[in-house]
Image (cartoon, helix red, strand yellow):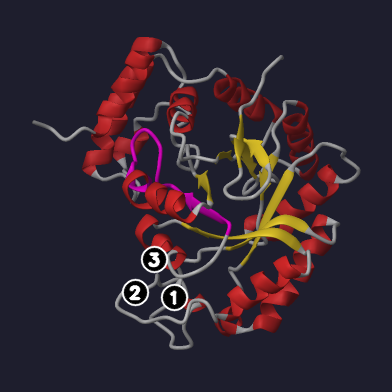
């Protein structure tokens, strides 16, 4: 399998990375060994960006990466996160965040990572000592948070200054709320999940312009919406998940039609559409087997969709009338 993945500048840093990255949220889904094999296959195919977090597999994701990347000589970027802490007060404890970072490094079998990010920087709990109804409540743009002096920002800056990481960043699942946090902090990367693919476009109007303005690397997660854009499924329409509004459902029907008419797989339609936008630095794919990463790499390396097919996907979000 001979493929070539596009390299893109990594924000304002002095490095580049592949436009396709491996998101390791479910890397241990089948087994530890299969996860290791998947990462090795990704490296063989030229993937050079790997994203993990302590929350993923309750640490298993980082352990798999630690095993898989040990003694590898390829030039890759490894990103992890702090967050999803078990005790709500620990979001505001620099010592608790440092302890989690130390455990991350132990599992990853290294003394440093390339990128260290805040997991769900759109959560209120990071930025205020005043609790809201639950620890996962998002930020409120009517509150005057002290973003820059928050414990997590102090820890991230400290890690960057000490060489524990080269870049720091924010992540989140809400385009508007994560952007609200990003406007108030000095970071290098911005990871947004579930907000940009053929049927969801919020990132284009909210996130991409801000990422360009701040010069940060724009990383996309959830491009295939937790695997729900990998194959046609009538069950999605019979019992729609929360994310699938009636409008998104109509777009998905339209995407299925394009798939049927062109014979291009849904993952290929999604990946090639997303990667056509120059605002995107890396699109993360949550492959959990060597075969899955092979399919995604083949799609990404195929390059942009034909112009008429790209326009048909673009028009799925066109306003009627």
Quickly name the residue at label 3. Answer: 180
Q: Few, some or many C-alpha atoms within 10 Å of disc 2 (few <14, some 14-19, many ≥20)?
A: some
On screen, residue 230 versus residue 20, left or right, reads left
On screen, residue 204 versus residue 9, left or right, reads left
Quickly name the residue at label 1. Answer: 124
Residue at x 55%, y 17% (from the top left corner) = 302
Residue at x 38%, y 63% (from the top left corner) = 177
**Residue 195 part of the magenta segment:** yes
Spatial separation of the CA atoms under disc 3 and disc 2 = 9 Å
Between 10 and 26, the one nearer to me in the picture: 10
The relative height of residue 301 versus residue 56 in the rendered view (above or below) is: above
| Position in image of residue 79 (x %, y %) | 68, 53
Q: Which residues are the magenta region?
A: 188-203
Q: Is label 3 or label 1 in front?
A: 3
Any part of residue 193 in sight: yes
Q: Quadrant of residue 62?
A: bottom right
Residue at x 43%, y 18% (from the top left corner) = 305
The relative height of residue 146 versus residue 75 in the rendered view (above or below) is: below
Circle 2/circle 1 CB separation < 8 Å: yes
Quickly name the residue at label 2. Answer: 140
| Position in image of residue 173 (x %, y %) | 44, 56
Circle 3/circle 1 CB separation < 8 Å: no
Spatial separation of the CA atoms under disc 3 and disc 1 = 11 Å
């Amino acid at each position: 399998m001979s493929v070539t993945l596009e390299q893109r500048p990594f924000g304002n840093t002095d490095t580049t990375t592949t436009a396709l990255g491996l998101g390791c949220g479910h890397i241990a889904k089948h087994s530890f060994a299969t996860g290791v094999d998947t990462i090795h296959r990704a490296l063989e195919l030229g993937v050079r960006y790997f994203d993990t977090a302590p929350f993923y597999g309750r640490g298993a994701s980082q352990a798999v990466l630690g095993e898989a990347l040990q003694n590898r000589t390829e030039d890759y970027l490894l990103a992890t996160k702090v967050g999803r802490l078990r005790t709500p007060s620990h979001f505001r404890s620099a010592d608790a965040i440092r302890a989690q970072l130390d455990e991350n490094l132990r599992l990853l079998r290294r003394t440093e990572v390339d990128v260290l990010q805040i997991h769900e920087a759109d959560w209120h709990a990071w930025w205020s000592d005043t609790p809201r109804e639950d620890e996962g409540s998002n930020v409120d743009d009517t509150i005057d948070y002290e973003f820059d002096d928050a414990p997590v920002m102090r820890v991230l800056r400290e890690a960057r200054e000490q060489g524990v990481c080269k870049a720091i960043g924010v992540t989140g699942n809400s385009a508007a709320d994560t952007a609200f946090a990003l406007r108030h902090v000095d970071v290098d990367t911005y990871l947004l999940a579930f907000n940009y693919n053929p049927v969801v476009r919020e990132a284009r109007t909210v996130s991409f312009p801000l990422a360009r303005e701040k010069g940060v690397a724009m990383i996309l997660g959830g491009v295939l919406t937790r695997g729900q854009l990998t194959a046609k499924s009538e069950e999605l329409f019979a019992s729609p998940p929360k994310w699938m509004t009636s409008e998104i459902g109509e777009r998905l029907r339209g995407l299925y039609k394009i798939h049927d008419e062109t014979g291009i797989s849904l993952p290929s339609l999604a990946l090639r559409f997303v990667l056509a936008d120059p605002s995107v630095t890396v699109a993360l794919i949550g492959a959990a087997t060597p075969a899955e990463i092979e399919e995604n790499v083949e799609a990404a390396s195929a390059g942009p969709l034909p112009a008429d097919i790209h326009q048909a996907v673009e028009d799925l979000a066109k306003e009627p009338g």
